[in-house]
């Protein structure tokens, strides 16, 4: 049976790699997507994997602390809940920020306009030319709208024989990039929910990362065996019937008495 722990780890690595590509693609095309947001999207899959990996140990420690000293170990008892809550909040915030770049809106057009105007004001010809050469376009809203090269004898449209402005393809790149990062964040959130549900069912799905021979029913079987060993021969318990010389000696003694 394919171990869920290994699948979780491999999926986290794939999501991390995708987020890294998106981060550098955003910087390469000067897209108006905050670098902090894309960097956090890179960190999130790895942080989520580490959080899921340590969660069973933290949960076991919190239960032990609750049994030993329920009033003096509050941080240790709340540690698993706090970490899972922080991950959920970070996932929700990143998803909301990235969704703004996916849905077409005047705000999205304003962000693109502001970004292009910033590049033009800074005379960042390298970044502007990279966008124009990537999408074979000139200017933003029109062919002569803040196009590169600046103040040349021939305009970009005449020099490169281009007929399309850059707004439409640049907007599509922004939406596609935001959508990919949004998918990464959404996948991390779904994996967190799935992991918590699996742990709730008491499955030892992380043991394959530490030991061999993962079985879904191991924890329940071990607990059942432990309860059977701990059952005392108290009041109401049926004592096992003994046979052999010792049983015969006890029977004779009771008859003589």
Image: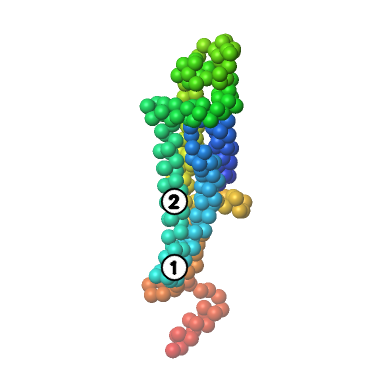
What is the quadrant of residue 97 in the picture? top left
Out of 50 and 152, give the one closest to the viewer. Answer: 152
Identified at 50% across, 67% down, the residue is 229
Asked if residue 74 can be seen in this view, the reply is: yes
What is the quadrant of residue 113 in the picture? top left
User: Residue 12 appears at what percent x and percent y?
Assistant: 55, 42
Mark 2 or mark 1, whichever is nearer to me: 2
What is the quadrant of residue 19 in the picture? top right
Out of 148 and 8, give the one closest to the viewer. Answer: 148
User: Residue 183 appears at what percent x and percent y?
Assistant: 48, 34
The alpha-carbon separation of the residues under discs 2 and 1 comes to 20 Å
Out of 227 and 89, give the one closest to the viewer. Answer: 89
Asked if residue 175 can be seen in this view, the reply is: no
Identified at 42% across, 65% down, the residue is 74
User: Residue 65 appears at what percent x and percent y?
Assistant: 45, 67
Read off the residue under disc 2. Answer: 86
Q: How is the image coloured?
A: rainbow
- Does 220 sit above or below residue 32? below
Identified at 42% across, 42% down, the residue is 93
Image marks 2 and 1: residues in contact by CB distance under 8 Å: no
What crowding class fits label 2: few (fewer than 14 Cα within 10 Å), some (14-19), or many (20 or more)?
few
- Does 122 sit above or below residue 66? above
Read off the residue under disc 1. Answer: 73
Identified at 41% across, 75% down, the residue is 234
- Does 253 sit above or below residue 16? below
User: Residue 72 appears at what percent x and percent y?
Assistant: 42, 70
What crowding class fits label 1: few (fewer than 14 Cα within 10 Å), some (14-19), or many (20 or more)?
some
Out of 55 and 103, give the one closest to the viewer. Answer: 103
The first of marks 2 and 1 along the sequence is: 1
């Amino acid at each position: 049976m394919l171990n869920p722990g290994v699948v979780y780890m491999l999926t986290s690595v794939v999501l991390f790699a995708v987020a890294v590509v998106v981060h550098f693609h955003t910087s390469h095309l000067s897209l108006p997507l905050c670098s902090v947001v894309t960097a956090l999207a890179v960190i999130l899959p790895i942080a989520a994997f580490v959080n899921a990996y340590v969660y069973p140990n933290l949960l076991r420690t919190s239960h032990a602390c609750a049994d030993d000293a329920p009033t003096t170990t509050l941080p240790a008892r709340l540690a698993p809940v706090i970490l899972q809550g922080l991950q959920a909040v970070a996932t929700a915030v990143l998803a909301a920020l990235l969704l703004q770049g996916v849905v077409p809106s005047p705000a999205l057009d304003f962000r693109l306009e502001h970004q292009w105007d910033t590049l033009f004001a800074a005379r960042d010809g390298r970044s502007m030319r990279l966008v124009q050469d990537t999408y074979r376009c000139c200017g933003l809203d029109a062919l002569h709208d803040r196009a590169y090269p600046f103040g040349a004898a021939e305009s970009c449209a005449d020099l490169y024989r281009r007929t399309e402005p850059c707004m439409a393809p640049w907007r599509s790149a922004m939406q596609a990039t935001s959508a990919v990062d949004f998918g990464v964040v959404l996948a991390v959130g779904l994996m967190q929910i799935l992991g918590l549900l699996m742990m709730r069912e008491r499955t030892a799905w992380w043991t394959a990362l530490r030991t061999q021979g993962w079985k879904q029913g191991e924890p329940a079987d071990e607990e059942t065996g432990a309860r059977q060993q701990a059952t005392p021969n108290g009041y109401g318990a049926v004592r096992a019937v003994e046979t052999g010389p010792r049983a015969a000696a006890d029977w004779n003694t009771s008859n003589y008495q």
